[in-house]
Amino acid sequence: MMRCLEASEKNMAYELRYLATAHEDILEADAYMSEESPDRAKRFLALLDVKLLQLRNTPFMYQVYEEYPIYRRIVIWDYLIFYLVNETEGVIDVHRVINSKMHVIKRLLEMQVGAE
């Protein structure tokens, strides 16, 4: 009986949470892309939704970001999506959605400064 419980707990879907910075980043990316191509912006948002929803069942499917290893990252076109997995709480926190052409580490460190 215990093995069945353990197996079902491992298949439990994680809760997905977006930090305020991630919301701001997504709005910024949408606005930027919409200027050039509203269709591209819609495709980006749809792809972002799909990839983030996949995480709920497989939170470790994407690599650890070597330059700042507390994060895992998803790559969608020119954008890097940074998230943390909290296994204890069963939560995935999406921290940032950053254009890879920007100074990525600086943008990630802004979060640490703001948290202090």
Image (cartoon, helix red, strand yellow):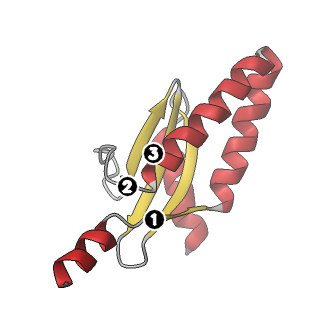
Which three-letter amino acid code belongs to the residue tagged 2? Pro
Q: Residue at x 66, y 35 (%)?
A: 45
SS label for mark 2: loop
The quadrant of the rendering that contains the C terminus is: bottom right
Foreground: 6 or 109? 6
SS label for mark 1: loop
> Between disc 3 and disc 1, whose residue precedes?
1
Residues marked 3 and 1 touching at CB (< 8 Å)? no
Residue 62: which quarter of the image? Answer: top left
Question: In the image, is 75 to the left or to the right of 16?
Answer: left
Please, which residue is most extreme toward the top here?
Answer: 36
Per the rendering, the mark at residue 51 is: none
Query: In this figure, which residue is indicated by the disc labeled 3?
Result: 105
Of the residues tagged 3 and 1, which is closer to the observer?
A: 1
Q: Position of residue 93 (x, y in %)?
A: 51, 62
Per the rendering, the mark at residue 59 is: 2
Query: In this figure, which residue is indicated by the disc labeled 1?
Result: 14
Question: In the image, is 77 to the left or to the right of 49?
Answer: left
Q: Quick check: can you spot residue 106? A: no
Which three-letter amino acid code belongs to the residue tagged 1? Tyr
Residues marked 1 and 2 touching at CB (< 8 Å)? yes
Would you place residue 73 above or below residue 116 in this image?
A: above
Of the residues tagged 3 and 2, which is closer to the observer?
A: 2
Please, which residue is most extreme toward the bottom here?
Answer: 2
Q: Residue at x 70, y 52 (%)?
A: 23
Mark 1, residues whose alpha carbon is within 10 Å: few (<14), some, or many (≥20)? Answer: many
Which three-letter amino acid code belongs to the residue tagged 3? Ile
Measure the C-alpha gap from mark 3 to mark 2: 22 Å
